[in-house]
Image: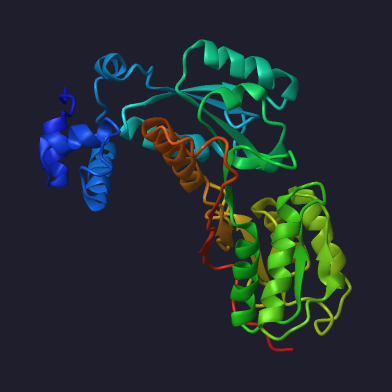
């Protein structure tokens, strides 16, 4: 059986003293340990699966070393669990544990769930959602340092720090990828109007055209939903019984499930991907984008990075006692990442 890693092991891996490890993982690194060394120590702690003795730390710091996470459906959903995974990575590296509750989209349970977590003496709270959305922040979250991940405060004067994906830039870079390949007739299956993310991605689509000195065709933007069948029927309307000169050379989708539907429509019509039609997704959904045939070019949502950034913000507020996660309107935008695969190619000759 492998022995549990010690602070000395972390010190050796990071190339620092044991006392530096203690300072950083006890929240006293700032002003005592260089930023680069702090980063190496936390990375080493994650690599070695090391966490300080929770009981000793709690007695020393008068803290529970527990973070409560409330989600709307992340725990029971096949999507976005990486947000909690990223948050837990950071929590463990800094000697905290996480306790997660899921309301299964029943917002009426939010307040009682927060009170339950507060009754357990958590040091801080995080609210996580599946899909970008505004939320009504439970009042209990204002009693301890708290942060929002993949969501934001719906009030006119928000009080909590939120960490969200940079959807406008993601939409712009996805479109720029297609423009760089020579495409000028790009249709956009943009999701649904009730999603805060959809209009942001549409804005990115428009911005990319403007930056390229082109005018985006509003007649090529369709709000059709998010599912495979919506992608299929949307693509059939664009492609079926349409001459090559009149059909789009690329279809950009607001998520990867729509892109699956587009690929099915292309196959139904005998169109080759990407020789006749390029398909662009969004999300980089596991076991979909990378396993499609051909594999899907897509924008990866930075879910794990959102969780890591949100937890870092929260723990910095707890350990620094500076209140940065509460009482101040602060936004962290995490960039999406272009993942180029085989479903996009040069514009076809007509």
Q: Nearer the viewer, residue 5 or 77?
A: 5
Quarter of image, res 276: bottom right
Residue in the picture at 25% in, 25% down = 52
Q: Is residue 200 above or below residue 113?
A: below
Q: Residue at x 72, y 32 (%)?
A: 136
In the displayed structure, does residue 69 sit left or right of residue 246? left
Count up the numbered dots. Answer: 0
Toward the bottom, the furthest residue is 350
Q: Nearer the viewer, residue 27 or 42?
A: 27
Residue sticking out furthest to the top: 119
Q: Position of residue 88 (x, y in %)?
A: 42, 33
Identify the image quadrant of the N terminus.
top left
> Which of the image's four quarters has the C terminus?
bottom right
Name the residue located 45 percent from the left edge and 41 percent from the top edge: 313
**Residue 181 figure quarter:** bottom right
Residue 22 position, x and y percent, is: 19, 32
Compared to residue 195, the image places residue 137 above or below, namely above
Relative vertical location of residue 18 with respect to residue 223 in this rendering, above or below: above
Relative to 94, 141 lies left or right? right
Q: Is residue 83 visible?
A: yes
Q: Is residue 49 visible?
A: no
Residue 225 at what x, y percent from top left?
80, 50
């Amino acid at each position: 059986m492998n022995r549990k890693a010690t602070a000395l092991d972390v010190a050796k891996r990071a190339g620092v003293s044991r006392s530096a490890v203690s300072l950083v993982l006890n929240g006293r690194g700032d002003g005592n340990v260089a930023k680069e060394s702090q980063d190496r120590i936390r990375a080493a702690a994650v690599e070695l699966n090391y966490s300080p003795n929770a009981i000793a730390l709690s007695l020393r710091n008068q803290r529970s070393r527990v973070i409560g996470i409330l989600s709307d459906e992340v725990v029971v959903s096949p999507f976005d669990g990486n947000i909690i995974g990223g948050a837990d990575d950071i929590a463990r590296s800094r000697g905290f544990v996480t306790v997660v509750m899921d309301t299964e989209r029943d917002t009426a349970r939010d307040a009682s769930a927060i009170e339950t977590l507060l009754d357990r003496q958590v040091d801080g709270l995080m609210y996580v959602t599946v899909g970008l959305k505004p939320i009504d922040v439970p009042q209990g979250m204002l009693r301890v340092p708290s942060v929002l991940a993949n969501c934001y405060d719906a009030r006119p004067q928000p009080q909590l720090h939120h960490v969200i994906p940079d959807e406008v830039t993601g939409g712009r870079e996805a479109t720029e990828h297609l423009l760089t390949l020579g495409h000028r007739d790009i249709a956009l299956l943009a999701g649904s109007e009730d999603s805060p993310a959809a209009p942001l991605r549409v804005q990115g689509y428009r911005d990319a055209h403007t930056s390229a000195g082109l005018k985006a065709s509003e007649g090529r933007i369709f709000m059709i939903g998010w599912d495979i069948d919506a992608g299929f029927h949307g693509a059939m309307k664009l492609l079926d019984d349409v001459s090559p000169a009149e059909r789009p050379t690329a279809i950009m989708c607001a998520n990867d499930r729509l892109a699956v539907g587009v690929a099915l429509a292309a196959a139904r019509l005998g169109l080759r991907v990407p020789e006749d039609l390029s398909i662009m997704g969004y999300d980089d959904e596991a076991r979909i984008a990378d396993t499609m045939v051909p594999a899907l070019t897509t924008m990866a949502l930075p879910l794990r990075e959102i969780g890591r950034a949100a937890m870092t913000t929260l723990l910095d507020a707890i350990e620094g006692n500076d209140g940065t996660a509460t009482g101040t309107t602060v936004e962290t935008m995490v960039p999406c990442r272009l993942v180029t695969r085989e479903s996009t190619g040069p514009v076809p000759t007509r």
